[in-house]
Image (spheres, coloured by chain):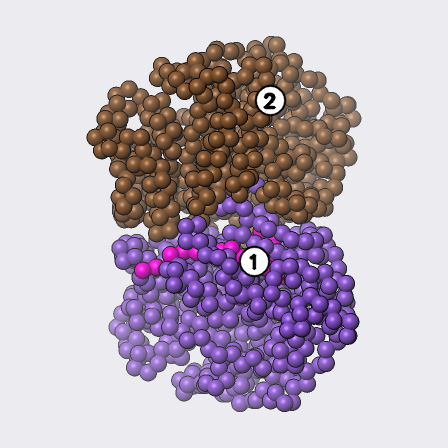
Chain colours: A purple, B brown
Amino acid sequence: MIGRYDEVTARWGNPDKPVTLSEGATAFLTERVGAPKPTQAVPRIDIVVPPTGLDDQARARLIEVVGPEGVSLDEDTRLSHGGGFSYLDLVERRGTSPHVPDAVVFPTSHDAVQQLIAACGQLNLAIVPFGGGTSVVGGVRPERGPHAGVIAVSFENMADVIGIDDIDMTVTVGPGITGPTLERLLGVRGLTLGHFPQSWERATIGGYVATRSSGQASAGYGRSDEMVEKLRVATPKGEFRLGRAPGSAAGPDLRQLFIGSEGILGIITEVTMRVRRQPRDKRYEGVMFPTYEDGLRAFREMVSRRATADLMRLSDPEETLTNLTMAAEGLKATALARYLKLRKVSGGSLAIFGWEGNRTQIGSRRDESWRVLRANGAVSLGKQVGNGWEHSRFSGPYLRDTLLDNGYLVETLETATGWRELPELRKAVTKSLKDSLAGDGPGPWVMSHLSHVYDTGGSLYVTVVAARDATDPVGQWQAAKAAACEAIVAQGATITHHHAVGRDHAPYLAAEIGENGVELLRAIKTYLDPDDTLNPGALLR
Amino acid sequence: MIGRYDEVTARWGNPDKPVTLSEGATAFLTERVGAPKPTQAVPRIDIVVPPTGLDDQARARLIEVVGPEGVSLDEDTRLSHGGGFSYLDLVERRGTSPHVPDAVVFPTSHDAVQQLIAACGQLNLAIVPFGGGTSVVGGVRPERGPHAGVIAVSFENMADVIGIDDIDMTVTVGPGITGPTLERLLGVRGLTLGHFPQSWERATIGGYVATRSSGQASAGYGRSDEMVEKLRVATPKGEFRLGRAPGSAAGPDLRQLFIGSEGILGIITEVTMRVRRQPRDKRYEGVMFPTYEDGLRAFREMVSRRATADLMRLSDPEETLTNLTMAAEGLKATALARYLKLRKVSGGSLAIFGWEGNRTQIGSRRDESWRVLRANGAVSLGKQVGNGWEHSRFSGPYLRDTLLDNGYLVETLETATGWRELPELRKAVTKSLKDSLAGDGPGPWVMSHLSHVYDTGGSLYVTVVAARDATDPVGQWQAAKAAACEAIVAQGATITHHHAVGRDHAPYLAAEIGENGVELLRAIKTYLDPDDTLNPGALLR
């Protein structure tokens, strides 16, 4: 099920089975963005990987800590640890001069990480903790800063399940374990973490925690940061073991300093997460609202009436149109469209709901949800649409390289705000992207969905497709991204709901937590990591 | 409904309606702890309140900040801000030499608090933020430390609702508002905070947040720390405004540094909490389990099967016995006992459940709960027992002075741990108290209940009644409390689930978060409050 990954050129998909644009998709894009312009990425042979900057002494010291097997200077290995999966990362990978770390190091234990931090401090090397490498905000971009060099630390060899406790309902893991592996091992015990971000196939638990990732079923299972029971962290100031018991009131929650710290305060070496029983049953369902506003109201009321589904997402009319014409294929789409015309909700907003549990729970909870849905004009599209969504829930990233191959710019961004403020936020972000990316063609195409709900608001996930500026694709997107970020900040929304800050959002952190907040974080960073060894340039610039 | 409070001698109850021990209670206590030994507290006229240590310059400076109405040197006012409501506080209040602050100051705005902090820094005065004064861990004990004096800051004049947003479902308040006032103001809008700690009648929202308090219905409504959307905090380093949007992933959650910080890092001057719709209906129910172990298993399974009630508490056999003989009266108790004998669950464990929502929700959720309850041998005692519990849910504190008047030691303590570890924890804490407080009589009497549940465990709330040592009541309890804390730490449990750390638990903080954790907190404290103006001696010693 899980797509192979091209380690060398770091494309998301399986190189043996390239994703192609369907005829329908091509027509849709041509009409709304412009015709495809096939462009090729540079072949591997033309990519010039810079030589490592590590001298013999540094190499010897690293080998002392992690053994000869634990240090790789290999070009392809360094290339595949040269950044994440933002549009800018993808654009860079299509060129000849990638940024790569001077080495990739593979520790096998907490103590090795602790020693590695000390060694890098002495050697004046920066460390980029590299989990699944799925950051889309420059969180794992290798940055030397004022240091003599930069190494990526991979957790591939710290990826075990250390323990499962099905009385306490916890799992303890190394930071490098990925979602599929963990779910497989939990599954044989009838358990699940229930955390399914779109990057699930590649992202690691350490990465979840370091960036506060949110899974698609966060309404039912919570966010990754809420799942953390215990943390073990290596820092230049030594080891931290945090999370003594559920519901402790013993002072500030120091776990919450390391959760979301994106590797700048310490390196997570062990995590205990709470787990859940695997649901006996699931019911996914597509639903159509007459308008986006109807959908928003229904989502808000489902939350306030405690009538939520475990998974809830609401596409705006643009995304609805895209999904109906691009995702659903052939007959299915036609049948769906005909049905919608009959029920007079064409042009509406598509929602996906998922309820999980035993049959009676699903039945009664779905009834409660539908009481609210009906009152807001919703029409069921049935299980088929819901199951179709579930089937393709991780497929988004596979398409991105293909769109780049066809001359498009494609990127996503996300934010969150209160229920009252959501409609204006959507308008402002959409406008900022449209204005910034307006060209000669019909595009850009901007669409969004409400992806995660809270008592007090929700998050907005925006996708934009535009004609790529062939001469300055980087500048083109940087300007658009800046415009979107400024619109978000001006609306009082958060600069990130689940992508984290990384390097790309760092300029906006002060808008989020105030200058005093940034200075407080900097003081904490200075205390824990006085030499700025850990991921310099991320989060705080 | 809300008991008046004796401001002068700081007894919890209404001095005009003293609580007396019933005949049944007296018999129960005599058998298990020893006969009452009436002892009187010192009359107010014999209490010598130390004169203020503030010189003219200091008084003038404080008046400059908060106005002449905002500074009180009055003896009775200082007396009623001289500590909290722990057993040791109560014992001290029965003597002639209370600890009191040098002044009580009543700021009216964030800016005034900000200026007050600066003024106290210059005047070398310590500040104790004083909310409802209900701390049972010495959190508001006025401690001068190395300072020239200590003032208590009351938030009585910062107790307004600043705004209610019934779209975003938030309420913004001054820190001094109490539960009853807030619920009344929310109630007229059909809303509720849903936070009902036992100290609800007197505790303030600022206190909730600064100590991570948990309400009795935390299974349904969450803990106070989970309800905080936004915080405004005054610190010696200036203002912090935190909490930009629901579900932000922008770095470490700095709110979580101030939440639970017990006034040592800053003073909370404004809080935005999420609110809920008032439930249309409630159903409270008493339930009897054959054994405590059956009850524990049922509670754990209710959580893991997502079949929880909004309120869930499980008394151990000792507390069950106490409740049945002391709390339920006359006929009711007899009828109940007869019923239990018939159903063969006498000697069992009493649980109280509360489901809230609309009728169908309550019906289907209660059905789900009962599927688990039945499988674990539970028998319903009906609504009457549940409603009886709800009726007396805030009555616990009223009895304490009365027990002291009768020569008893009475105190509560609480902790939390994983499901697997709970039985051993209960045994160890019970043993530590019994060993430490064993005397010539039959006592002590130790009882507990499981008071709050989580995915991975629960909290244990322990009550102890013993014959008070007339010559050294303080030393007697200090030894017992130390023994209990050491037992808790040895079991790997948390030193506090919702009472916070204060001064009494500070020696055990390192066991909770490690020496490195304490040093990190100290570094943060040094950065934010270099002169140690804010609540010195609390949390960190």
| Quarter-of-image position of residue A262 | bottom right
* Region rendered in magenta: A255-280
Amino acid bearing label 2:
Gly
Q: Position of residue A244 (x, y in %)?
A: 54, 46
Answer above or below: position of A3 versus B303.
below
Q: For mark 1, name the chain.
A: A
Say the numbered circle drawn on residue B475: 2
Question: Could you tell me which residue is drawn at 77 percent across and 35 percent down?
Answer: B122
| Side (left or right) of B452 relative to B264 | left
Q: Position of residue B408 (x, y in %)?
A: 48, 18
Amino acid bearing label 1:
Glu
- Local crowd at mark 1 within 10 Å, few (<14), some, or many (≥20)? many
Q: What is the distance, in whole Å, between disc 1 and disc 2 at their CAs?
A: 42 Å
Q: For mark 2, name the chain.
A: B
Could you say which is closer to the camera, residue B467 or residue B44? B467
Could you say which is closer to the camera, residue A157 or residue A503? A157
| Side (left or right) of A45 relative to A274 | right
Question: Could you tell me which residue is drawn at 56 percent across and 79 percent down?
Answer: A7
Residue A166 lies in magenta, yes or no?
no
> Helix, strand or loop at disc 2?
helix
- Residue at the disc numbered 1: A270
Could you say which is closer to the camera, residue B135 or residue B38? B38
Q: Quadrant of the C terminus of chain B?
A: top right
Residue B287 makes an appearance in the image: no
Q: Quadrant of the N terminus of chain B?
A: top left
> Helix, strand or loop at disc 1?
strand
Question: Could you tell me which residue is drawn at 41 percent across and 16 percent down?
Answer: B30
Residue A260 lies in magenta, yes or no?
yes
Q: Position of residue A152 (x, y in %)?
A: 65, 70
Question: Could you tell me which residue is drawn at 47 percent across and 52 percent down?
Answer: A456
Answer above or below: position of A457 versus A35.
above
